[in-house]
Image: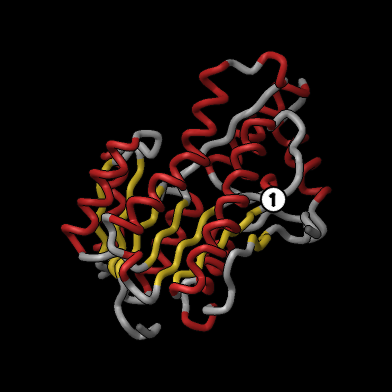
Amino acid sequence: MSDSTTKTAIVTGATSGIGHAVAGVLAERGHRVFICARDGEKVALTVKEFRNQGFDVDGAECDVRSPENIREFVTAAVERYGDIDILVNNAGRSGGGVTATIADDLWFDVINTNLNSVFLLTRDVLSIGGMQKKSWGRIVNIASTAGKQGVVLGAPYSASKHGVVGFTKALGNELAGAGITVNAVCPGYVETPMAQKVRQGYAAAWDTSEDDVLGRFQAKIPLGRYSTSSEVAAMVGYLVTDAAGSVAAQAINVCGGLGNF
C-alpha cells in the first residue's frame, strides 16, 4: 500500500484543536476520515464543515471512556469505510491540582480519558477494524511532553501521558515486524481550547491572572511561543506516510524546544 492509495483513518477528539487539524491534514490527502467526539452535535457540525470543503469525512458520537461506545464507534467506522489503515488517538483532557486533595473521580476520569481509551481503541482497531490482518498500518498517539517529565500540579495528566508513551513503545516493538508502526507525538504548549482551561486552572492555583500564567509558560519555551495545532498535525501527517516507515516505537516532541528528552 502506497501513499497514493486512499486510506481509511480514525481520528478521535476531532471537533477542535489538534484532532481537528489532524483530520484536516488526512482529509486533504484524499483519505476517508471517520471522526468522533463526546458531543454528537459538534461531530455533525465538523463533518458538515469538512464535507463543504469536498472531503470524504463522516463520524459518530463516542465517549472514549466507555468500552462499549468505542466498540460501537469502531464498528460504525468499518461499516462506513471498510478496514482501518490509520488510527490517531487524540481525545484527551487536562486535569490536576494539589495531589493531596485530588478527588477519586478526577484521577480516574483523566486516566480513563487519556490512557485507557488509547488501549481500547487500538485493540478494537487492530481486531474489529482489521488492521492486524494487513501488512501496512499507522497508529499515532497524541501524548505530551508531560509524558516524559513531571508536571507540577498535573500528576493525573502526567501519569496518563507517561502511560501513553509506554504503551506506544511496547506496542510499537510488538507490531513493527508486521508493517504497522506505532508512534507518539508529544506536544508541549499548544494553543487550543484545552490550553485555555489549563491556564485558568493555574491562575486559580497561583492566585494570579491568566495573562501572567501565559507569560510564565512562554518564558519556558525556547521558541518563545506556543506551538500551533497545525504544526502538531504536520508531524502526525509525516508519521502516517510511507516515508516514515522506519520510524517506530518513538515519542517525538513538537514543543518549540521545551523538552530536550
**Residue 250, horizontal then vertical, whole percent:** 63, 64
**Residue 234 against residue 157 in the figure, above or below:** below
Q: In which quadrant of the rendered view does residue 34 lie?
A: bottom left
Split into 4 quadrants, where in the image is the N terminus?
A: bottom left
Q: Is residue 214 left or right of residue 4?
A: right
Q: Which residue is mark 1?
A: 145
**Residue 60, horizontal then vertical, whole percent:** 25, 46
Which residue is painted at 25% across and 70% down in the image? 54
Of the residues shown, which amino acid type is indicated by label 1?
Thr
User: Helix or strand or loop: what does disc 1 sit on?
Assistant: helix
**Residue 103 against residue 178 in the figure, above or below:** above
Which residue is painted at 24% across and 63% down in the image? 51
Between 230 and 246, the residue placed more toward the observer is 246
Split into 4 quadrants, where in the image is the C terminus?
A: bottom right
**Residue 232 against residue 179 in the figure, above or below:** above
As drawn, the residue found furthest toward the left would be 79
Which residue is painted at 40% across and 70% down in the image? 137
**Residue 123, horizontal then vertical, whole percent:** 38, 51
